[in-house]
Amino acid sequence: MDAPLADDAALMQAWTGGDAAAFTTLYTRHKGALYRFLLRTLKDRALADELFQETWSRVIAARARYRPEARFSTWLLQIAHNLAIDSFRKQRPHAGQEETEAVFASQAAPEREQPEHALSDFELRRRMQLAMESLPDEQRTAFVLRMENELSIEEIATVTGVGRETAKSRLRYAMARIRELVAE
């Protein structure tokens, strides 16, 4: 697991030194995980596309300031997370947590009304997606960072800018809620 950290740090140093191929390797290695994170966090393809480009623009602008104190992927996702938070603030300046949860609950309601039957792989994935979408933003972000990007609690805390215990709590509540909704 230390090899990708060293590889990414070495690639960043090479790129800062003028090696354009190093950036191409970093981009190729991390573009899929970054895009999935943004798409699942934002649930809006156009906005995810926009913030995907903006994240890479910020990486390019900040490459000389990058320090390999954390994994490159953690740094990259932290930039994306901050852009997503800024986007949420612009889109929903007055929406509180209770209002947001009510909207998500109303969107997921039709799924619960379907007759009970054995779940196919597709149905299970669909329930999982609906369950993820019903989570409050902070919990969904913690869940996606853990499950999609395999970040540790400490790395989730770093990306989201909260304490370790807060990140752990958000992840615990998200996991419990996902289990509950998928089991229904």
Image (tube, rainbow, N blue to C red):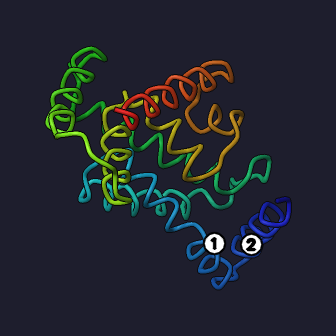
Q: Amino acid at mark 1?
A: Leu
Kindly state the secondary structure of the residue where label 1 is placed: helix
Q: Which residue is mark 2?
A: 11
Q: Quadrant of the N terminus?
A: bottom right
* Sequence-earlier tag: 2 or 1: 2
Q: Residue furthest front?
A: 117
At 15% across and 34% down in the image, what residue appears?
113
At 46% across and 29% down in the image, what residue appears?
139
- Tell me how many marks there are: 2
Q: Determine whether label 2 and label 1 are within 8 Å by CB.
A: yes
Q: Which residue is mark 1?
A: 26
Q: Position of residue 165 (x, y in %)?
A: 67, 18
Above or below — where is 26 with respect to 178? below
Horizontal side of 32 relative to 106 (left or right) equals right
Q: Position of residue 116 (x, y in %)?
A: 24, 40
At 31% across and 33% down in the image, what residue appears?
134
For label 1, count other residues whose C-alpha is less than 10 Å away and answer few (under 14), some (14-19) or many (20+): some
| Quarter where residue 51 is shown | bottom left
| Quarter where residue 10 is shown | bottom right
Q: Position of residue 71 (x, y in %)?
A: 73, 53
Kindly state the secondary structure of the residue where label 2 is placed: helix
Q: Amino acid at mark 2?
A: Leu
At 38% across and 45% down in the image, what residue appears?
128
Which residue is nearer to you in this view: 44 or 58?
44
Horizontal side of 73 relative to 51 (left or right) equals right
Q: Residue furthest bottom?
A: 21
Q: Quadrant of the C terminus?
A: top left
